[in-house]
Amino acid sequence: MPKKSHLLALFVAALAPLAASAAESTAPLKTLKPFASEKELAALFDRWAEEQKRRRDELRAAQGAKSMSAPASLAAAPAAAEADSVTNVQHAGVDEGGIVKLHGDYLVVLRRGRLFTLSLTNNKPISVSDAFGSNVDPGGAWYDEMLISGDTIAVIGYSYSRGGTEIGLFRISPAGELAYKATYHLRSNDYYSSRNYASRLIGSKLVFYSPLYLNPWGGSPYNALPAMRQWGKGDFRRIAPATRIYRSDEPLDPSQGLALHTVSVCDLAKAELDCESTSVLGPAGRVFYVSPESVFVWNVKSAVFRIPLDGSAPSSLKVAGSPIDQFSFLEDRDGFLNVLVRGGGRGEAMWSSEARAGDRSLLRVHLSRFSDGRDAAPAESYQPLPGVQGWNLQNRFVGNYLLYGAQALYVVRTADGSSFGLPLKHRVDRLEALGNDAVVIGSAGRDLHFTSLRLAPYPVKAGQYVQENAAQGETRSHGFFYSERDGLLGLPIIGGGQRALRHQLRNASASILYLKNSSLNFSPIGTLDAAPANTNDGCRASCVDWYGNSRPLFIRGRVFALMGYELVEGRVERGRISEVGRVNFAPGAAPIGRFAPPAVSTVAP
């Protein structure tokens, strides 16, 4: 009889092929093909130019030699430690560019074209710096996002005057002092969205999606190919050779709009920034979503590209409809891509996510269905969903559930497509996760409502709280934060009847509201309030808060409120929060007040 060790070895050997198969089960059937050489890419550009010349000559003949300009749609845009995270992100481990980050015992704040560091132990502002180099003209630039890797701070901006994404690198010392290192410039067109963020950080790898619109007959198309340069040190250099530019076998018509959908990965761990790009040539338009493994890009002709972050070949799938924003996506642990799609959607560029659109479906397709662009998601992959009325549709995946709504709320179990309608007494203005459950936040009249949802085994309303005469002070996803450890959630608020979408651009929120979550029942513990703002800050760049300016922060048992140029600390005792200190770090302002010592600021159980 074989020994147990021999049987175990045979059993493990038998399972090995199955384990390998499971590990590779999300691999695409086929991948997109790259251009074989620079010569092949140049031949395509030459053919497009010849075709356009022929069309132009025919039109001139038909119209009496009237000149024809390139389609407006093709014109290039004017030449973007986990446990201590203070950012409300879509995926654990995938940090998103934001206006405030934690680095050791220091908060780093990006506001109105400047960087600030604030000590959480010395209880005072430490350092301030322009968010751009002394040799960089900030005119026409917007410095909106920041990420930190090691002792390197990356400030992400978009320059309308220079036409590209700027990456400003700064060093933060152990004492919290800031020092400028360098600025790099990536070619890109405008990435701005009212809901999405331009940058992600996975480990030390900085990830960007950039649409690069091609106009083959309006100057050299090579001037639109992915490239980067260090500011003040020479010209652009290509970072996507022809062999890393992919396309499907489908015909492409430049007269209908074309883009190089480009994912750039830059390593912040290197002494000098080094970036590499992968591009997919396809129709213009986009919504993009970053999972821990890939970037998914949805174009206007209803194809979705899957661009792996490891530099391997992209794949594609024909699909129907359009997502609303990045929260319409979830790459789940079972290897499925889940997407809420709607007919007539326009993607997420600028304010497009806020528009009304058509019927909705849940697309659930296994990643192994992706191929070389000629295959389509099967009809059975689409689950029709109940319709909802109204603008500003919100959607989000929480665990195995999709939540969406505007005037009404629906919850869908992704595994079987079961949908549940939950009547509410308020709008759906925000959807957020509370661990494995969720909260719906929205206005009704002049009041702000919070409704908690227990999602498993089936969705039900669990609790409700109403803050009278209040509205959201921030619409950005980062404006909300939940500390599962402390059972506390925070949200910026303003007076009832005001519109957060407009208010957050130029004014800090009036207060941060804090609620205690006890088994999905909310109890208010109070607010931390802003003082009258000092608006004479000598702003030189980014003088509108596109990404908001107010954040609740939970840091190692301490509770803070960032509101404009103020950082306020609160202490929670006997179920109520009270202010114990504040610092005003506005440029030119003397620090006001002090924080409480960390040891006495605790969160009540």
Image: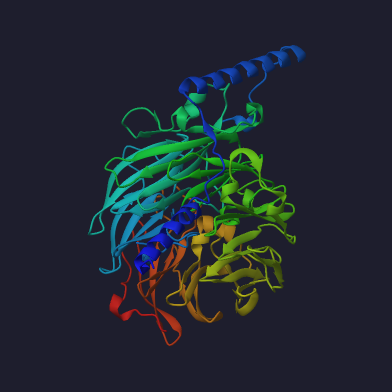
**Quadrant placement of the N terminus:** bottom left
Kindly indicate the quadrant of the structure image that contains residue 564.
Answer: bottom left
**Quadrant placement of the C terminus:** bottom left
Determine if residue 541 is in view: no
Residue 136, relative to residue 50: is it above or below?
below
Residue 527, relative to residue 148: is it above or below?
below
Say which of 6 and 328 sits in front.
6
Say which of 555 and 359 sits in front.
359
Q: How is the image coloured?
A: rainbow
Say which of 103 and 35 sits in front.
35
Residue 582, relative to residue 272: is it above or below?
below
Task: Judge from the rendering whether residue 123 lies leftward or rightward of residue 410; answer left or right.
Answer: left
Task: Judge from the rendering whether residue 100 lies leftward or rightward of residue 410; answer left or right.
Answer: left
Kindly indicate the quadrant of the structure image that contains residue 389.
Answer: bottom right
Determine if residue 65 is in view: yes
Indicate the position of residue 36 as horizontal and vertical percent values: 49, 25
Task: Judge from the rendering whether residue 428 lies leftward or rightward of residue 174; answer left or right.
Answer: right
Indicate the position of residue 550 as horizontal and vertical percent values: 47, 63
Residue in the image at 60% along x and 47% along y:
369
Residue in the image at 47% along x and 76% along y:
488
Residue placed furthest toward the right = 62
Residue in the image at 49% along x and 61% along y:
478
Indicate the position of residue 258 as horizontal and vertical percent values: 60, 32
